[in-house]
C-alpha cells in the first residue's frame, strides 16, 4: 500500500512538470485532489490496514495531499506570472512621436485681452458695464461737452443713422448712462462710482493695416468726493501694472479732450525695452497708451452729479491696440476678418 | 509744426540753460514733441564768406570755371567751380580745405586737370534752403573769411510738435506763444515782440473797408507803397526753411514769417485790384481761381474778401490769383483779420483745401493780435527795406469781441483737484508767467484770463488747475490711492452668461469665436445670393445695419470653407431690428450666433449636434431644458424646412435652422451647414433653476427598450407623460432604424424606486399602459 503513495507522488511530479497552462494544471488538480481523484482513491484502500498502519498511512496520504496542493498553488502562481509577462510583452508599443490632434476652439483675441483687463479692474472694485453700440447724439457728444461744431461730430468721422442716432465713436458715449445709473447710490449712500465699460466703436475711415472703422475700447470712470489727479495717476499706474503683469512706470502729458479737464495723454515705460529706448518706442523709452483726465464739470452735471461736490477721473484704453501689442498682430484687419487661420490661434492664458 | 529754438530764443533768454532739457519739459508740460530733434548746422564746419576775384574759363570744359577766391587769407586760392552764376565780385559760401559738409571733408583735389583748393557752395549744400541752382549769393556786407555760422543763424535746434496736440491751443500756433511756455518752464521773462508804431500814420487816409458779415470778427489793414526789396534777409529765409516753408519773395516771406512767429495769418493784395474791401458771402455759387491757380467752387456759406462785388480772396483760407502781388506791384494792401473759426473749418472741408492759414483760424485765434501783427509787419518791412512807405492809416473794424473770462477760486479747490499741496507763490508765479492776471486776497485767487487763452481754451476754474499742474510737472506729483469706501462689485447676469457661453462653446464644443461688422457684407452677399434686408441705415452711403448675424456668418463660413472638414464659429454681436416708431430709437439687440460646417456629417447629424450644443448650454448655464417648435421662414436666406424656434420656460429665445440650399451649395456642394441665433438678453433673463438634489438609487432599476414605428419622438414622450408613473425616471432615444418600411425608433425607459426593488409585473403593466397610449395615436411596436 505504502508504495502506492510514492508511485502517485512520482506520477504527480512528472505530470506537474509537464503542465504548461492553467487549464492543464486544473486537470491535474482534479486528477489527484478531486472527489474522485487518485489521492482520495488511495484512502479507499485503507480499510484493509491495521490501526497502526492506518494512522501512519493516513498521515502520509495527508502529507501527499498537502504537498500536491502546495505544488499546484506554486505552479499556478508561476504560470500566472509567466502569462502576465507574456501579456505585458505582447501589449502594443504606442508611438507618441506623431503630433497630437488638437481639437479645440479659440477665443477672439479681443475677448482674451478684455477679460484680462476686466479681471484687474474688478479686483480693484470696478463694476463691468456693457452698453449699446447705437447711441444718441446726446450720449456720444452733447453729454460729453463736445460742442455742436466739433470736428468729431462731422459726418466724415462718425457714422450717423437716418433716424438721427449714430454708431458710437467712443466708449465715452456710455458715461452719461453710467452716471445716471449710479448717481443715486453715490449721493444717497456714499457709494463711489467705479465702473469700466468695454465696447465696440465705429469711425468712418478708410481701412488699412493700421486703421479700422470698427474697433474696441474700454473706458473707466471713478467718481466720489475728493477724487484728484494724484489718485488718477495712482490708479492708472496700479491698474496698468496689473494689465501688463509687471511694474510699469507712467507719465502724464497734457492732452485735450472736451470731456475731461485737465486732460492727459498717458505714456507707459516701453514694454519691450523697459524705458531704455528701442525701435518699438522710437527710442523714446515711452509708449503713448491712453487718454485720461479729470471728468469735466459739465459732463458730471449732465450725469446729474454736482461738480462742486464730486470729482472724478476717466480713462480710455484701446483694447484693439492692446490685443495687437500683446499678440504682435500687425494688420488690424485680421481681427474682423473672421479668418480662422489667424483667429484659431488664440486660447486663454492664465 | 516745426519750431526753431533760435526763434524762440528771440523772446526768452536761454543763456546757461540746457535747451534739449527744456524741449523735453515742454513735451511733458505743454504739447508732445516728436522724438527726432534736428541739430541744424551741426554737420557743417569751416564754411566762410569768400569773394570771387577772377573767373577764367576752363580750357576743356564749357561748364567749369577756374576761379580765384579771396577767403580772407593772404593770397586768393584757386578753385574749380561748375556753378553757372560765378562772376567777379560775387560773395559766396566757401568751404575751405579741411571744411566739413556732412560726412565729407573738403580737400585739395584735381578736377579736370586743375587743382581745386576748396569748394564754392550752394545754399542747398550748406542746408539753409533747397536752392541748388547755383552757388550762394551773399549780398550782405561781410568781410571775406568770416565763418558763415558767425553771421547767419545756420546752427539751430529744430523740433516738431504734432499739430493734433495743439488743437485746443490757438496761442501755440506761432513761436511767440511757444516762447511764453518756455519762459514759464525756464522761469525767465518773456520779451515783447518788436513792432513799429502805428500812431504816426493816423493822419493818412483810411482804407475803404467794411465788414458786411458777422462771420468776420475783425479786419485790420494798412496800405504800403514803394517796396524795393525782393529777397528776404538770409536769417529770415533760414528760419522759414528750417520751419518747413519755402522762401518766395520778401513780401510773402514776411507774411509767412509773422504767421510762424505770432500765429496770425496775413495776406497782401495788390492795391490796384483792391480799393474797396468788403467782407461778405454771396447769394449764389460761383467759381473762383485761388493763387495756387486752382479753380474752386465757392458756395453761399463761404466767406469772401471782395473788392466791392468782385471776390479777391477766400477769407482765412487763400487769396485769389487775380489780386496776387506781381512783379510790377508797387502798392499793397495788407490784411490782418480774424474770422469765425467754425465757418473757416467748414469751408475748408467743403473746398477740400486746408492751408496753413485756415488751420490756424479754425483753432479760434485771438482777434486782439491783428493790429500787433501789422505793427510787426511794418517793423520787419521798414528794418529791411527803409524806403518803403506807409500810405494809409491803420484801418480796423472790430465787430465781435470774445467776452473777458475771469473767475475766483480758493486754496481748497486746488487741493481737492490735485490731491497734493502746491504753495500760493507757485500758483501765483505760474499763472503770471503764462500771462494770467492773478491776485490773491483773503485766500481767494482772482484770475483774469489773457485774451489769447480766452477764445475757447480757458473757460472754467478746472482749466486753471491744468495750468498750475502742468507747469508744476506731473512727474513731481506725490501719488496716492483714493480714500473712498469699498463695496463689493456687482456683476451683471448678462456679462456672466456671455462669459459662460464663450467658455462652453470654446472649451467643450471646440468652436471658434469670430468678430464681424455690423453692416451686411454686400459683395459676399451678392456672391452667395443672400438678399440685403431693408433696415435703418447710415446717412449718405445707403449702407444698412444688419438684421441677423447668421448671413454674415455664412460669409465667414465661406471664407473658411477650406479651413477644416468640420468646424464651427460663433459670435456675440449686435443687430438692429428697425426703429421703434414711438421713441424713434433703433431696436438694437445682442445676439449669439453659432454656425457649424461639416463635410463628414449628414445634415441631420449636424443639425442634431447643434441642438445638443444648445441644450447643453442651457442645462449648464440655467439648469433648464430647451424645447423646439417648427416655425415658418421669415428671411429669404433660411431653408424653409427644418427651421425651429428655441424655447426655454415656454419663451422663444432664438431659432435653429439651415441656410437656403442654393446658398449652401455655393459655399460647398458637399458640405452641410446649420446655424442658430439666440437673443442674449432673453437668454440671460431666464431665471436659473436651482439644483434639486436626489439621493442615488439604493435599489437596482430596470430598463425597458421599445422599438416603435414612428419617425417622431414627441408622441412617445407625450404617451409616457400621460401614463405619468412615478417609477419612470428617464426616457431616452436609444437608436434609429431606417428600412424600406420607414423609420423606427428604439426608446429606452428607465424605472426605479428608492425604497424597494421593482417587480417584473409592475414594470410590465406600466409598459403596457404606455403601449396602449401609443396605439391611440397610431404608433405601434415594430
Image (cartoon, coloured by chain):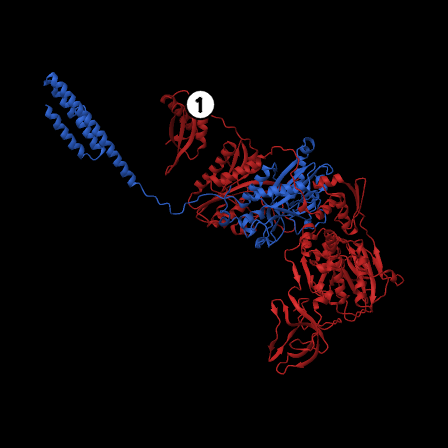
Chain colours: A blue, B red
Q: Position of residue B62 (x, y in %)?
A: 64, 80
Residue drawn 41% across and 45% down? A100
Residue drawn 12% across and 28% down? A7
Compared with B488, B235 (above or below) is below
Q: Position of residue A263 (x, y in %)?
A: 69, 46
Image quarter in which the N terminus of chain B is found: bottom right
Residue drawn 37% across and 21% down? B759
Residue drawn 60% across and 41% down? A239
Q: Position of residue B690 (x, y in %)?
A: 52, 28
- In the image, is B763 to the left or to the right of B140? left
Compared with B345, B631 (above or below) is above
Q: Quadrant of residue B109?
A: bottom right
The residue to which callout 1 is attached is B726
Q: Position of residue B360 (x, y in %)?
A: 73, 56
Q: Nearer the viewer, residue B303 or A69?
A: A69
Does residue B350 appear in this view?
yes
Does residue A209 appear in this view?
no
Q: Quadrant of residue B319?
A: bottom right
Image quarter in which the C terminus of chain B is found: top left
Q: Nearer the viewer, residue B647 or A129?
A: A129
- In the image, is A182 to the left or to the right of B327? left
Q: Secondary structure at mark 1?
A: loop
Residue at the right extreme, as displayed:
B203
Amino acid at each position: 500500500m505504502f508504495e502506492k503513495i510514492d508511485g502517485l507522488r512520482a506520477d504527480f511530479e512528472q505530470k506537474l512538470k509537464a503542465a504548461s497552462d492553467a487549464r492543464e494544471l486544473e486537470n491535474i488538480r482534479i486528477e489527484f485532489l478531486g472527489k474522485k481523484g487518485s489521492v482520495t482513491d488511495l484512502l479507499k484502500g485503507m480499510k484493509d490496514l491495521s490501526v497502526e498502519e492506518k494512522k501512519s498511512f493516513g498521515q502520509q496520504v495527508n502529507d501527499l495531499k498537502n504537498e500536491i496542493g502546495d505544488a499546484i498553488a506554486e505552479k499556478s502562481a508561476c504560470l500566472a506570472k509567466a502569462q502576465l509577462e507574456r501579456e505585458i510583452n505582447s501589449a502594443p508599443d504606442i508611438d507618441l512621436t506623431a503630433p497630437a490632434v488638437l481639437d479645440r476652439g479659440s477665443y477672439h483675441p479681443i475677448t482674451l485681452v478684455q477679460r484680462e483687463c476686466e479681471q484687474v479692474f474688478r479686483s480693484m472694485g470696478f463694476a463691468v458695464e456693457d452698453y449699446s453700440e447705437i447711441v444718441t447724439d446726446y450720449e456720444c457728444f452733447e453729454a460729453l461737452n463736445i460742442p455742436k461744431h466739433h470736428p468729431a461730430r462731422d459726418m466724415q468721422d462718425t457714422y450717423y443713422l437716418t433716424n438721427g442716432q449714430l454708431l458710437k465713436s467712443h466708449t465715452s458715449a456710455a458715461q452719461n448712462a453710467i452716471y445716471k445709473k449710479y448717481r443715486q447710490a453715490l449721493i444717497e449712500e456714499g457709494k463711489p462710482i467705479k465702473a469700466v465699460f468695454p465696447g465696440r466703436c465705429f469711425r468712418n475711415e478708410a481701412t488699412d493695416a493700421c486703421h479700422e472703422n470698427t474697433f474696441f475700447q474700454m473706458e473707466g470712470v471713478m467718481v466720489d468726493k475728493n477724487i484728484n489727479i494724484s489718485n488718477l495717476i495712482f490708479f492708472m499706474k496700479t491698474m496698468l501694472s496689473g494689465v501688463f503683469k509687471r511694474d510699469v512706470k507712467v507719465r502724464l502729458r497734457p492732452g485735450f479732450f472736451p470731456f475731461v479737464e485737465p486732460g492727459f495723454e498717458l505714456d507707459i515705460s516701453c514694454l519691450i525695452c523697459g524705458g531704455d529706448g528701442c525701435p518699438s518706442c522710437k527710442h523714446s523709452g515711452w509708449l503713448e497708451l491712453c487718454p485720461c483726465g479729470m471728468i469735466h464739470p459739465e459732463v458730471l452735471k449732465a450725469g446729474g452729479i454736482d461738480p462742486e461736490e464730486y470729482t472724478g477721473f476717466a480713462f480710455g484704453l484701446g483694447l484693439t491696440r492692446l490685443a495687437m501689442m500683446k499678440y504682435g498682430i500687425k494688420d488690424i484687419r485680421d481681427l474682423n476678418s473672421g479668418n480662422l487661420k489667424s483667429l484659431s490661434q488664440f486660447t486663454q492664458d492664465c | 509744426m516745426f519750431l526753431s529754438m533760435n526763434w524762440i530764443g528771440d523772446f526768452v533768454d536761454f543763456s546757461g540753460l540746457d535747451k534739449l532739457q527744456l524741449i523735453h519739459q515742454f513735451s511733458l508740460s505743454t504739447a508732445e514733441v516728436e522724438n527726432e530733434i534736428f541739430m541744424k548746422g551741426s554737420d557743417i564746419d569751416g564754411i566762410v564768406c569768400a569773394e570771387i576775384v577772377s573767373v577764367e574759363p576752363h580750357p576743356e570744359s564749357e561748364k567749369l570755371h577756374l576761379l580765384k577766391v579771396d577767403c580772407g587769407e593772404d593770397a586768393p586760392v584757386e578753385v574749380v567751380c561748375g556753378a553757372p552764376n560765378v562772376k567777379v565780385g560775387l560773395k559766396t559760401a566757401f568751404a575751405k580745405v579741411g571744411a566739413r559738409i556732412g560726412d565729407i571733408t573738403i580737400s585739395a583735389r584735381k578736377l579736370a586737370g586743375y587743382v581745386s583748393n576748396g569748394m564754392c557752395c550752394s545754399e542747398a549744400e550748406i542746408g539753409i534752403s533747397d536752392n541748388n541752382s547755383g552757388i550762394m549769393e551773399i549780398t550782405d556786407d561781410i568781410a571775406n573769411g568770416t565763418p558763415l555760422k558767425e553771421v547767419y543763424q545756420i546752427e539751430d535746434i529744430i523740433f516738431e510738435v504734432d499739430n493734433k496736440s495743439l488743437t485746443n491751443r490757438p496761442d501755440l500756433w506761432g513761436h511767440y506763444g511757444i516762447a511764453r511756455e518756455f519762459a514759464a518752464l525756464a522761469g525767465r521773462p518773456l520779451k515783447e515782440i518788436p513792432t513799429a508804431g502805428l500812431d504816426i500814420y493816423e493822419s493818412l487816409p483810411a482804407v475803404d473797408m467794411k465788414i458786411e458779415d458777422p462771420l468776420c470778427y475783425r479786419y485790420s489793414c494798412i496800405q504800403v507803397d514803394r517796396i524795393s526789396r525782393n529777397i528776404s534777409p538770409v536769417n529770415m529765409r533760414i528760419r522759414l526753411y528750417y520751419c518747413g516753408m519755402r522762401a518766395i519773395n520778401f513780401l510773402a516771406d514776411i507774411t509767412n514769417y509773422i504767421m510762424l512767429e505770432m500765429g496770425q495769418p496775413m495776406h497782401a493784395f495788390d492795391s490796384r485790384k483792391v480799393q474797396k474791401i468788403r467782407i461778405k458771402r454771396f447769394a449764389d455759387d460761383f467759381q473762383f481761381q485761388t493763387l495756387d491757380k486752382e479753380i474752386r467752387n465757392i458756395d453761399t456759406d463761404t466767406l469772401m474778401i471782395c473788392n466791392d462785388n468782385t471776390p479777391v480772396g477766400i477769407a482765412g483760407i487763400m487769396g485769389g490769383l487775380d489780386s496776387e502781388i506781381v512783379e510790377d506791384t508797387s502798392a499793397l494792401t495788407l490784411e490782418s483779420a480774424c474770422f469765425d473759426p467754425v465757418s473757416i473749418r467748414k469751408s475748408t472741408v467743403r473746398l477740400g483745401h486746408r492751408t496753413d492759414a485756415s488751420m490756424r483760424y479754425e483753432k479760434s485765434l485771438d482777434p486782439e493780435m491783428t493790429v500787433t501783427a501789422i505793427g510787426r509787419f511794418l517793423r520787419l518791412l521798414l528794418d529791411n527795406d527803409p524806403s518803403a512807405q506807409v500810405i494809409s492809416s491803420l484801418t480796423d473794424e472790430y465787430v465781435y469781441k470774445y467776452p473777458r473770462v475771469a473767475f475766483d477760486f480758493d486754496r481748497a479747490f486746488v487741493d481737492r483737484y490735485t490731491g497734493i499741496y502746491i504753495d500760493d507763490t507757485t500758483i501765483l508765479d505760474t499763472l503770471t508767467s503764462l500771462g494770467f492776471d492773478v491776485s490773491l486776497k483773503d485766500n481767494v485767487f482772482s484770475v483774469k484770463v489773457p485774451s489769447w487763452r480766452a477764445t475757447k481754451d480757458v473757460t472754467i476754474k478746472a482749466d486753471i488747475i491744468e495750468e498750475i499742474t502742468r507747469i508744476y510737472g506731473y512727474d513731481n506729483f506725490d501719488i496716492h490711492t483714493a480714500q473712498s469706501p469699498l463695496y463689493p462689485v456687482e456683476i451683471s447676469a448678462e456679462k456672466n452668461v456671455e462669459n459662460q457661453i464663450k467658455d462652453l462653446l470654446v472649451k467643450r464644443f471646440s468652436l471658434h469665436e469670430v468678430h464681424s461688422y455690423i453692416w451686411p457684407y454686400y459683395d459676399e452677399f451678392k456672391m452667395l445670393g443672400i438678399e440685403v434686408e431693408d433696415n435703418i441705415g447710415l446717412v449718405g452711403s445707403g449702407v444698412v445695419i444688419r438684421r441677423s448675424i447668421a448671413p454674415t456668418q455664412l460669409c465667414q463660413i465661406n471664407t473658411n470653407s477650406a479651413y477644416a472638414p468640420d468646424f464651427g464659429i460663433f459670435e456675440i454681436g449686435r443687430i438692429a431690428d428697425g426703429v421703434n416708431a414711438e421713441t424713434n430709437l433703433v431696436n438694437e439687440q445682442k445676439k449669439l450666433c453659432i454656425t457649424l460646417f461639416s463635410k463628414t456629417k449628414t445634415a441631420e447629424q449636424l443639425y442634431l449636434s447643434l441642438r445638443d450644443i444648445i441644450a447643453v448650454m442651457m442645462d449648464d448655464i440655467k439648469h433648464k431644458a430647451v424645447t423646439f417648435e417648427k416655425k415658418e421662414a421669415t428671411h429669404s436666406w433660411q431653408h424653409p424646412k427644418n427651421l425651429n424656434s428655441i424655447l426655454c420656460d415656454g419663451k422663444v429665445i432664438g431659432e435653429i435652422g439651415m441656410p437656403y440650399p442654393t446658398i449652401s451649395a455655393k459655399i460647398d456642394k458637399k458640405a452641410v451647414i446649420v446655424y442658430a441665433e439666440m437673443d442674449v438678453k432673453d437668454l440671460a433673463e431666464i431665471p436659473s433653476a436651482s439644483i434639486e438634489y436626489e439621493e442615488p438609487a439604493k435599489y437596482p432599476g430596470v430598463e425597458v427598450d421599445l422599438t416603435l414605428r414612428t419617425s417622431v419622438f414627441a408622441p412617445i414622450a407625450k404617451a409616457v407623460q400621460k401614463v405619468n408613473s412615478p417609477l419612470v425616471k428617464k426616457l431616452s432615444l436609444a437608436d434609429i432604424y431606417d428600412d424600406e418600411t420607414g423609420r423606427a425608433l428604439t426608446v429606452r425607459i428607465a424605472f426605479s424606486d428608492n425604497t424597494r426593488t421593482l417587480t417584473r409585473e409592475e414594470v410590465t403593466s406600466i409598459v403596457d399602459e404606455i403601449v396602449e397610449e401609443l396605439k391611440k395615436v397610431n404608433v405601434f411596436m415594430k
